[in-house]
Amino acid sequence: MNDFRAAGHAAVDQLADYLGGLADGPVWQAMDPAARERLLGLALPEQGKGLTELVREIGSDVLPYPMGNGHPRFFGWVNAAPAPAGVLATLAAAAMNPSSAGGDHADVHLERTVVRWIAELVGFPHPPGAGLLTSGASMATIVALGTARNRAARLLGVDVREEGLSALPPLIGYVSAETHSCVRKAAELLGLGSRNLRAVRTDAAGHLDPAALREQVRADRAAGLHPFLAVASAGTVNTGAVDDLAAIADVCAEERLWLHVDGAYGAFGVLDPAVAHRYRGLDRADSLALDPHKWLRVPVDCGCVLVRDPVELRGAFSLVPSYLRDENAGGLGWFSEYGIEQTRPFRSLKVWATLAASGREGIARDVAHCTAMARRLGELVNAEPDLELVAPVETSITAFRYAPAGVPAEVLDQVNRALPVAVQERGRAFVTGTVLGGHEALRACLINPAVTEKDLAVLVEEVRASGADLLAPLNA
């Protein structure tokens, strides 16, 4: 173990230097073509390399070319800077290397605790067994919708696990144009069919309209169809909009629909007293998908699904072959009875370390800082005559665009479509684009508590400068 000890010390020093120096370098830069080709063309060595040599190669060939998400001026997608406590815990979890499917060992019990912690943070009811960690919100959504599908089938007198989808009439689900694409993927993979997902009307800010949901459900029932699911958003990925969860929950209760809430990015916004009112009704969902690897900064991968009824969850997935029987499993059984994965990584240690290092107070403070910075960015955008805020700032996403007066709409779309890459290539800030209301726009996501107002000013400056550069030849 001497080689491991020496290499381990070198690796920690190397990573500390890397994390400590992120803010001083470019946010992102394209890989050197030679370095890219070197990684693409690596041959499997005939003879093994020493650990110290491997650490050195990581430092020279990998760490210099990050995605950029560790930098405080990375505002792209919803990718977090990793919490140092989670980085260290990941190393310890890998050293233990258990399968967290079940049994009586530390990772299993720690997972039950951190799932409970997550539920407590967002105020979601959590009976034991009603949740588990997943690879991310996409897998959490598959688990949640699979549970909803099985309940709907049972209410129709069908054991879908035994009889299959052919024994079921089409089941109808309801989403909005702003619903995350993982919901459609889940519906397709579960055999529900994307054409059976009805797109419900939204308001101008992207909130699902509860009255329109009620109307559409009743119209489908009158047509002899079988509505079973509604999906609401606790923070959309485009603008951070939070649906009227209480009103949607009322409709679901009246119409006997399973209410799934996508809170992957935004549900933790409930910890900020300034915006907590937007989340009223979150605790009434039947299932909730969250991503600790987003706003909580747990190192990837780590999602979470919470379900109101653990019996429904276990009933959808439990399968215990004879070779996995475990008399020490206890009444809750194994985690593998509640989801897709059999062999499961030790995710809970990095969640525990990340949350314990900050405590509830620190987590809430970081969330509130991010939402405040997003609102401040909205103010900076409004102060510039050539920028335009395109949606209200509800959580920690600010959607805006470059829009000088007198420029035709089609030209503005052309410029704003090219703007994200132009900003990224300059290296001082990183922002990504989207389409809102049929027009190209930028969306800056703020989930790094290290962000400052100076960083926001740099982003505004870079967008304006890049926009002007892109517009100039079009006006020539």
Image (cartoon, rainbow, N blue to C red):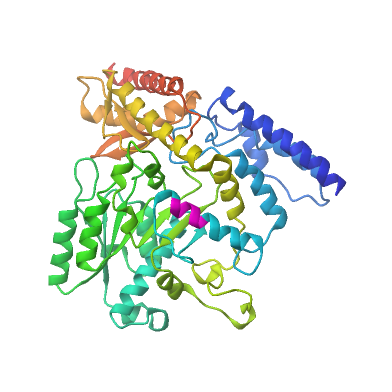
Depth check: give the residue in front, 375 or 74.
375
The residue under the point 85% across, 45% down is: 3
Depth check: give the residue in front, 153 or 246.
246
Depth check: give the residue in front, 62 or 445.
445
Q: Is residue 256 visible?
A: yes
Q: Is residue 116 magenta?
A: yes
State which quarter of the image contains the C terminus: top left
The magenta region covers 115-120
Q: Main secondary structure of the magenta part?
A: helix
The picture places residue 175, in percent across and down from the top left corner, at 27, 56
The picture places residue 443, in percent across and down from the top left corner, at 36, 34
The residue under the point 44% across, 41% down is: 78
In the image, residue 92 above or below residue 139: above
The residue under the point 26% across, 18% down is: 385
> Is residue 113 shown left or right of residue 169?
right
The residue under the point 27% across, 22% down is: 382
The picture places residue 318, in percent across and down from the top left corner, at 49, 75
Picture quarter containing residue 367?
A: top left
The picture places residue 73, in percent across and down from the top left corner, at 48, 28
In the image, residue 446 above or below residue 142: above
